[in-house]
Amino acid sequence: MYEIEKGVPLQASVRPTKFPFKQMEVGDSFVVESQSARISVIQRAKVLGYFVTSRKQLDGTYRIWRVA
């Protein structure tokens, strides 16, 4: 059986991210190597409340910019 407890506050969810959103200012960018990494970056940024955009570079990598 599980013990039911009342009045325990919900803790904030803290998921570490390998992407440098906190250290970035608007206009800063970084490079990822693959399309799947680009998608991961965009999805994670959205969850964390950052606005990013990406462009494919001539060498086949993707540059990610923080735009807001």
Image (cartoon, grey):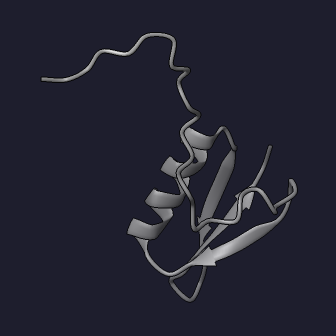
Residue 33: x and y in percent read 50, 81
Residue 54 in the image, given as x and y percentages of width and height: 62, 60
Residue 51 or residue 19, whichever sits in front: 19
**Residue name at image x 66 percent, y 38 percent:** 49
Residue drawn at x 65%, y 53% as measured from the top left: 53
Q: Residue at x 70, y 65 (%)?
A: 20
Quarter assignment of residue 2: top left
Rendering coords of residue 47 (x, y %): 55, 40
- The quadrant the C terminus occupies is top right
Using the image, determine if residue 68 lies above or below residue 25: above
**Along the viewing direction, whichever of 4 and 56 lies nearer the viewer:** 4
Q: Is residue 27 above or below residue 32?
A: above
Q: Residue furthest left?
A: 1
Q: Is residue 59 left or right of residue 37?
A: right
The residue most toward the bottom is: 59
The percent coordinates of residue 57 (x first, y second) are: 61, 78
Q: How many marks?
A: 0
Pick whichever, 66 or 55, lies toward us.
Answer: 66
Could you tell me which quadrant the N terminus lies in? Answer: top left
Q: Is residue 2 left or right of residue 48?
A: left
Q: Quadrant of residue 64?
A: bottom right
Q: Residue furthest top?
A: 6
**Position of 51 relative to 31 (above/below):** above
Q: Residue at x 77, y 56 (%)?
A: 22
